Amino acid sequence: MNPKDDSKDPLVIGDRTFSSRLIVGTGKYKDFAETRRAIETCGAEMVTVAVRRVNITDPGQENLLDYLPLDQYTILPNTAGCFTADEAIRTAMLAREAGVGNLVKVEVLGDEKTLFPDVPATLEASEKLVREGFVVLPYITDDPITCRKLEDMGCAAVMPLAAPIGSGLGIRNPYNLRIIVEQAQVPVIVDAGVGCASDTAKVFELGCDAVLMNTAIAGARDPIGMARAMKLAVEAGRASYLAGRIPRKLYATASSPIEGMLD
């Protein structure tokens, strides 16, 4: 496999196939035009939209879908801002009624300061939405047990955080992410916490299937430049993972053979 040939290394989520393994959010940009430029630059094919914060339902007002048409991008509506399972379910239903499909990122927050997921509420909302025919991608803590439960109930992917939303702290617990990757039979999409290109490359070197980010690009001094950097980081990290890193060793190993040199 040539890791540079995306067609031979697709990301498959449910019945959808993507060439890009970078999913991006649409908030925090100065306007919709900058949002579009950043998304075009990073090469993302799937974009996530906070249904409660960004207009995708009222055609009488400026609408994000005017800049990101459904025939070019897969819209991943998310339930950001919801603090109960019922709120998340209603928000997902609203997005489906607006015509953006049955794909949904389930985000049920437990605390306004940390924005960590409410795990029981996330499990409840995800289970009900799966039964309603949604393709569910849940935002969750980096807990292998919870990720396994979400997969078992029929979620199309699991989305463990790397660090708190918008923090830019990078991967705080690579060991839990490795366990999640090893046990998962669905894509593992790291969601939240990356801050720079090296964080993104590390996500893929751990074996994760995709990464979702918003603030890391939109909040950068040069969002378009960071979008370009993140695209390259995804490609480099995935290629590195597929190539297979050398084992870590305590002592040095000579680059050139030394056997026979003194014979």
Image (cartoon, rainbow, N blue to C red):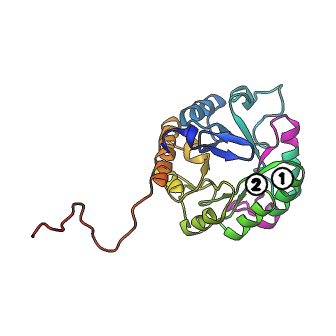
Q: Nearer the viewer, residue 179 or 138?
A: 179
Q: Is residue 48 visible?
A: no
Amino acid type indicated by mark 2: Glu
> Which residue occupies 83% across, 26% down?
59
Q: Which residue is mark 1?
A: 88
| 116 in magenta | yes
Amino acid type indicated by mark 1: Ala
Q: Which residue is mark 2?
A: 107
> Which residue occupies 67% across, 68% down?
143
Circles 1, 2 touching at the beta carbon (< 8 Å): yes
Q: Is residue 228 visible?
A: yes
Give x and y (percent) for residue 20.
59, 40
Boundaries of the magenta span? 94-122
Give x and y (percent) for residue 190.
62, 55
- Decide if residue 205 is on the left or right side of residue 89: left
Q: Nearer the viewer, residue 207 or 172?
A: 207
Mark 1 Cα within 10 Å, few/some/many (few <14, many 20+)? many
